[in-house]
Image (cartoon, rainbow, N blue to C red):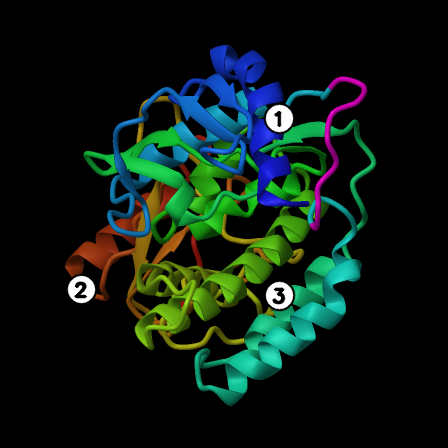
Amino acid sequence: MSADALLRKEHEWLPALAPRLPLPVPVPQRLGELSERFPRPWIVTTWVPGTPADRAPATRAAEAAGTLAAFLTALHRPAPEGAPAGRDRGGPLAEHAEGFARQLASAAELGLIPDPDAVRAVWEDAVTAPDWTGPALWVHGDLHPANVLTADGTFCGVIDFGDLFAGDPACDLAAAWLLLPDGAAGCFHDAYRPAPDAATRRRARGWAVLKALACIFIGEAGVHGRPGGKRTWGPPAQAALRRLTATAHGPGSRAPEGAVVLGGHHDEPVERSDPGRPCPRVRVPKAAVHGPQRLVQVGERVALPRSSPHRGVQVHRPDQAYRDSRQRLRKRAPGVSRARASR
């Protein structure tokens, strides 16, 4: 689809969607047609203040996760008959297998990614997830950091709806890893409605890998001054791959150095939060602390899943504070089960 067609699509559909969205978007005001003075269509939209997230990433994790979840909850509604289809996204991930393999091999050859096998593991899990069987929902289609604006550490606007389409929301849910700070993906999934099932989250991780690889190449082109390159796109994409591969290992395996936590059932760590409260975390000082299908490293700051019996428990260092915490755990306060730690 040409850039002209993307512009016309935005002009046709966005004015009806904008009023229900909780973040400002560039609402088309006028569409200009090609003429002798300018041989392309053009558009006038409202201005959305803010700084693109590739230049000013979100830093307030809980607020950013909640804001992003509210925006996508409002956007992801059934699309009407005749809504546009995605030009190269929104369908089965398997359709992109060949392109993914080429990109991964090229990135590995150029030394752009430190652990190609971990990236491949995320992808292989995603492509085996069941396809979307729900109604075709409105999807932004291109939620990478340059298309989301920030102010004061959180998101304040979303731009570039040229890829707007009706289809699988997993394409947009990839933004949890592409846009949010470390450890905030679970807060996002906790707030998004309806809560995404495991298959949708797995597909979203696959879309996130695809988008991150594409942005890494654009960033690399910018570093070397090649046409179309944007050097600010590389670092956020690298951070996204790091978040994704930190949870690419199966239950019971040992986490790599710097990993956040190992998710069971092909899932990322899910941080649970009560309304108005930040996501709970614990610092784990032991060599390995086992929970339900969990194994983490010494001193890691980890996010606990909503189903974990260890929610809200702080596991201290093996001093008096640690022994005190063990005593508190043995009392098994309501909603908190005993934690198990090994030296």
Say which of marks 1 and 3 sits in front: 1
Q: Quadrant of residue 152?
A: top left
Q: Amino acid at mark 3?
A: Val
Say which of marks 2 and 1 sits in front: 1
**Of helix, strand and loop, which one carries label 3?**
helix
Q: Position of residue 81 (x, y in %)?
A: 81, 19
Q: Bounds of the magenta span? A: 80-88
**Residue that label 2 marks:** 319
Q: Amino acid at mark 1?
A: His
Q: Position of residue 129 (x, y in %)?
A: 76, 54
In whole angstroms, how far apart are the C-alphas of marks 3 and 2? 38 Å
**Residue that label 3 marks:** 122
Image-based side of 262 in relation to 235, left or right: right
Kindly check if marks 2 and 1 are in contact, taking CB atoms under 8 A apart as contact: no
Image-based side of 189 in relation to 131, left or right: left
Q: Which mark is residue 76?
A: 1
Q: How many marks?
A: 3
Q: Amino acid at mark 2?
A: Asp
